Image (tube, rainbow, N blue to C red):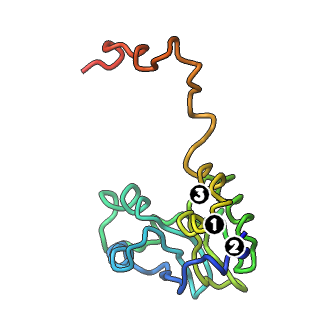
Amino acid sequence: MKYKLVKDLMTTPAIYVEDSTTIKEAISILKENNIGFLPITKKEIIVGVVTDRDILVRGIGIYKLNTKISKVMTSGNIFFVSPTTPVDEAAKIMAKNKIRRLVVLDNGYVKGVITTKNLLNEPSLLPYITKTYISDKTLPSYSSFSNSNPHDSIDVNDYPL
């Protein structure tokens, strides 16, 4: 394995915002940095995370843009690793919890983020990365279809207009 520790692959410097940041300011930071994830801190201690999807689904249309980001952030069970966590352990955490990003904390402070995109630099981690996106339980096996072509089992009446 070429990369052994999270610190070898994580994205730095850490880009994060305080919980008093507005949704509008968070959107600007996401756009300016071409990222889709922000750790949220209070006096530099992690209190939540927010994704571009969180803002779209739980923010826009529900709250005004001058609302604090803390209204739409995910808080509580935040997954994180340290810079010295082995990369395969980080990949296992992501796969088990179906998450694509982990906050990297060092002595309680945000130091960076490691993502499935970062993990692509280590080919041996591909099976874990795949599991963060695809659930074995949700995919039908090819043999579960009634014939050799799964599209033959589809009836136009199954999808009324």
Q: Which residue is mark 2?
A: 2
Of residue 81 and residue 87, the one placed in the foreground of this image is 87
Circle 1 packing at 10 Å, graded few (<14), some (14-19), many (20+), is some
- How far apart are the two marked residues, 2 and 3, measured between alpha carbons? 23 Å
Q: Nearer the viewer, mark 2 or mark 3?
A: 2
* Label whose residue precedes the other's in the sequence (2 or 1): 2
Q: Nearer the viewer, mark 3 or mark 1?
A: 1
Give the x, y percent position of residue 50: 48, 67
Is the residue 38 above or below the residue 142 in the image?
below
Which residue lies at the image location 57% right of the left edge and 34% below the top edge?
138
Which residue lies at the image location 30% right of the left edge and 57% below the top edge?
61
Give the x, y percent position of residue 49: 53, 69
Give the x, y percent position of residue 59: 37, 61
User: Could you tell whether 155 is left or right of 118 in the image?
Assistant: left
* Label whose residue precedes the other's in the sequence (2 or 3): 2
- How far apart are the two marked residues, 3 and 1, measured between alpha carbons? 18 Å
Report the amino acid beneath label 2.
Lys
Q: Which mark is residue 122?
A: 1
Q: Are marks 2 and 1 in contact (CB under 8 Å)?
A: yes
Of residue 59 and residue 140, the one placed in the foreground of this image is 140
Report the amino acid beneath label 1.
Glu
Is the residue 105 above or below the residue 57 in the image?
below
Q: Which residue is mark 3?
A: 99
